[in-house]
Image (cartoon, rainbow, N blue to C red):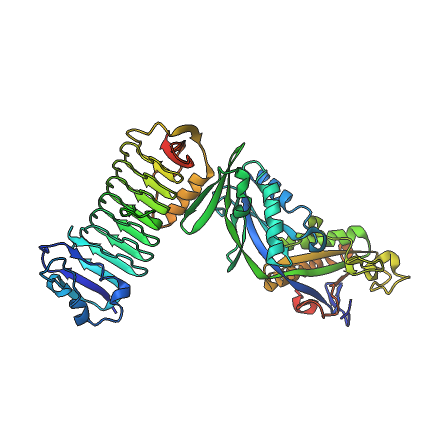
Amino acid sequence: MSGVGETMVVNGVEIDDSFAEAFPMAGTAIEITAINEKWALEAARSMTGFATSVIACGCEGGIDRLLSPDETRDGRPGVRVLFFSFDAGGLEKQVTTRLGQCILTSPTSACFADFDGEETIDLGNAIRYFADGWQISKKFEGKHFWRMPVMEGEFLCEAKTGITTNGVGGGNLLLMARSTPQALAACEIAIEAMRKVPGVIMPFPGGIVRSGSKVGGKYKGMMASTNDAYCPTLKAVTRSELTPEIGSVLEIVIDGLSAEAVADAMRVGIKAVTDLGPVEGAIRIGAGNYGGNLGPHHFHLKDLLP
Amino acid sequence: MSGLTFRKKAEPEERLDLSPLVPARLAGLAAKDIAALPIGLTRRGLVVDDVFTIAGDDPAAIRFEGGSHRFDRIGEAMAAGDITVDGDVGVRLGRAMAGGTITVNGTAGDDAGSAMAGGVIAISGDAGDRLGGPFAGEMTGMKGGTITVGGHAGARAGDRMRRGVIAIAGDAAGDLGSRMIAGTIVVGGTTAATPGRLMKRGTLFLCGGVDHLAPTFLDNGPADLLILKVMADAFAEGAVGPVPFAGKMMRRLGGDTAVLGLGEIFLPI
């Protein structure tokens, strides 16, 4: 990490003079609907499972927000999910595989495009052959759908969805506290606020990652390894970034359909943590970067203060 | 600029070929050049000025004030712009059109929307035979776009239809959607015998019931399908407008099993 200079203090919470370094990613949004919210969420959670880090999972995915029936294409409860990957090809592979295994299979589900982009990737186009010749293509009012007979009835899926290549992956906040419960409390209140920002996801479990990583490691082939500079148990034996009073660090990673969305999410997250204060939550907020030489998006914490 | 208007002087004594009077072909022409365009079909040699009084100067928005069943080929092959006809039109309305909008405040003759690939044709009254169909020897009829008919439609509407939507508010005559390849037809009134005969794919909504179905259509039972709502909602917001199957349970029949059998007919329960 670099860039830790003079700290600022807001409501007793120290904020590093640092920045989050983020990278361009291909991203898309999909609308999943079902007979009720429970089943829409089941499908969405299944589809976005094991999508925490693009390095090992092939993509990063998560739930953007719930959709009310008057917001969805078929008038049923829905969920908007976002996916990000290194490029359009990787994104399509992940989305269509997950579509086939998690949405097609989920009772009463339907799937619609939820992002208008000049580039597109396949949705129903990629999985229609499951219907073994009984698939039905319907084009009307500028939209293209595939209808696939399934044992439950019929699976309806839009043929394609738009993507952006201006998505941003790797926005982050490091929340440092005296103890794990305090770090977790700070993260939870930040996540609650950040989930209200449209167009972003926090892809790790509950939006939080406890095992933040650095690039590479001492062992051959390791693309990432534990971020020892922020491990409290290594304070005395490594080049630690932690002061003695810090006993636990949790990270929030943010992916967004635009840099503005990521900045907005970080801004409301910082505000939530500083509003909570150092007694119940974090005593310090930092951000992860690689010296500024790898990612073109630099989100400076000082620019995001409440 | 105001829309280019052709005001009918009197009922023509012969059928007219009005295919030159489309936005792309009139763009850049002076009024005197438009007036001299030949539109007659006999050796009498009628030109535009013999039949119409011309007003306005915007060829992207053309209006015919006064129609006739002798006004043939209006909007043929047009790709953009608007044509409005206050009255009836003859045959081949919007044949092979690729874009734009044609509005007829009257009835249309045979072959309206024949082989059209895009755009919208809205006919407030009745339409003749072979609506959205092919000409003899053509492999496909309508390949895209939307046709709405406020009244009834003649025989073989949607014959060999490949893509697009036809919505008929009134009744449909015999052999609706015959040899249909794909696409969607909605009929609000009753449908005469044997709709969808030899259809391979495609969807027929026969909301007012049907006189008689070919025995090669097989009953799939009641169908509470999501696509019905999605289509109804999309149509309601688009050129088709509200459709009579919105919110209703329908019965699905698959066919025509005499051929590929991947088409479908929806009937009210």
Identify the residue at horizontal 56%, vertical 60% (top origin).
Answer: A164
The image shows residue A62, relative to residue A256, as above or below, that is above
Q: Is residue A31 visible?
A: yes
Q: Is residue A164 left or right of residue A204?
A: left
Query: In this rendering, does residue A109 appear at all?
Result: no
A30, B159: nearer the viewer: B159
Identity of the residue furthest to the front in this view: B137
Residue B164, percent from left and from top: 37, 47
Residue A169, located in which quarter of the rendered image? bottom right
Q: Where residue A233 sits: x, y (%)? A: 87, 56
Q: Quadrant location of the C terminus of chain A?
A: bottom right
On screen, residue A217 above or below B163: below
Residue at the image position 42 percent from the left and 39 percent from the top = B228
Residue that appears at 43% across and 36% down: B262
Snapshot quadrant of residue A300: bottom right
Front position in the image: A101 or A198? A101
* Front residue of this view, candidates B195 and A157: B195
Q: Eyeballing the image, is B241 above or below B19?
A: above
Q: Position of residue A241 (x, y in %)?
A: 82, 64
Tell me where residue A186 appears, x and y as whole percent: 73, 54
Q: Nearer the viewer, residue A19 or A83?
A: A83
Number of callouts? 0
Quadrant occupied by the N terminus of chain A = bottom right
